[in-house]
Amino acid sequence: MNPLPRPRVTPPSRNAQARLERLAADEEAAGRAPKTPVSVVLALGANLGARAETLEAAVRELGEHSGIDDVSLSPVINSVAVKLNGPDPEAPGYLNAVATLSTTLSPRDLLAVGAEIERAHGRERLERWGDRTLDIDIITYGDLAIDTPALTIPHPRAAERDFVLGPWHELDAQAFLPGYGSVAELLAELRATQGPASETGTP
Ligand SMILES: Nc1ncnc2c1ncn2[C@@H]1O[C@H](COP(=O)(O)OP(=O)(O)OP(=O)(O)O)[C@@H](O)[C@H]1O
Ligand SMILES: Nc1nc2c(c(=O)[nH]1)N=C(CO)CN2
């Protein structure tokens, strides 16, 4: 009897199959608009141009969007630019802040709104962690956890960033980063290992 023909395409292993299913679920979640408003935390940064005016305008523009309400802004801090090789005191310094808001936009649409505001303020993407007129990152979106090529939530580097945790803690001392822990504790741990933020204060 002839042996059964071998399949020409090797089926994905169980692990690979599980990863594909997880990605499909995350992509679906990234595009899903919530039925009721969701609380969101954004991080804003600028180290080129009229930094303070840009941050102020960006927050106003977020609040003017029909899918966004209740925008609150943390104190704005000065911070040394963190480059791929570490803090760079020679690079233009940043102003950083954190905004909380509620939204009926899907995570993907909120990312697009942030990108459009960045573009309107002259953001150019020339190099990773390069100098920029405006950066808007989604830190949390309710308690959602997704990992897709275009969007990872919570932001995967938030827990390592004093310039995110610091202003966030000032805005909300009870804040929690889903999957990582309390912002107060994360900040204390970070400062215990890295020392206090190299430069902070209200500009
Ligand atoms: N939570 C997130 N918030 C914003 N952008 C994200 C997020 N997760 C993934 N991205 C993707 O990251 C891409 C690059 O973003 P950006 O150029 O702002 O990175 P960066 O600010 O230089 O670095 P970092 O991501 O470390 O803050 C965006 O086009 C977006 O698709
Ligand atoms: N101080 C500071 N450094 C950074 C910042 C930032 O917002 N502030 N953003 C980066 C990429 O998102 C890279 N480095």
Image (tube, rainbow, N blue to C red):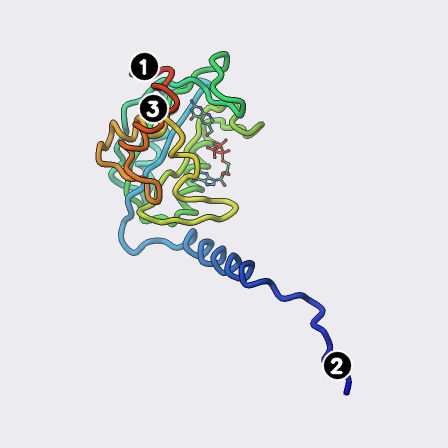
Question: On residue 186, which mark appears?
Answer: none
- Binning the other alpha carbons within 10 Å of mark 1 as few (below 14), some (14 to 19) or many (20 upward) gives few
Left/right of residue 100 with respect to residue 88 in the rendered view: left
Question: On residue 192, which mark appears?
Answer: 3
Find out whether the residues at labels 2 and 1 contact each other: C-beta distance under 8 Å: no
Q: Earlier in the sequence, mark 1 or mark 3?
A: 3
Label 1's element? loop
Q: Earlier in the sequence, mark 2 or mark 1?
A: 2
- Binning the other alpha carbons within 10 Å of mark 2 as few (below 14), some (14 to 19) or many (20 upward) gives few
Which mark is nearer the camera, 1 or 3? 3
Which mark is nearer the camera, 2 or 1? 2
**Is residue 10 or residue 69 the one in the foreground?**
10
Mark-to-mark CA distance, 2 and 1: 77 Å
Residue drawn at 39 percent across, 29 percent down:
161
Residue under circle 1?
Answer: 203
Label 3's element? helix
Residue 171 % position (x, y): 24, 30
Mark-to-mark CA distance, 1 and 3: 25 Å
**What residue type is disc 1 on?**
Pro
Mark-to-mark CA distance, 2 and 3: 65 Å
- In this view, which residue lies farthest toward the top? 90
Q: Is residue 17 above or below residue 117?
A: below
Residue drawn at 72 percent across, 69 percent down:
8
**Is residue 107 or residue 87 the one in the foreground?**
87
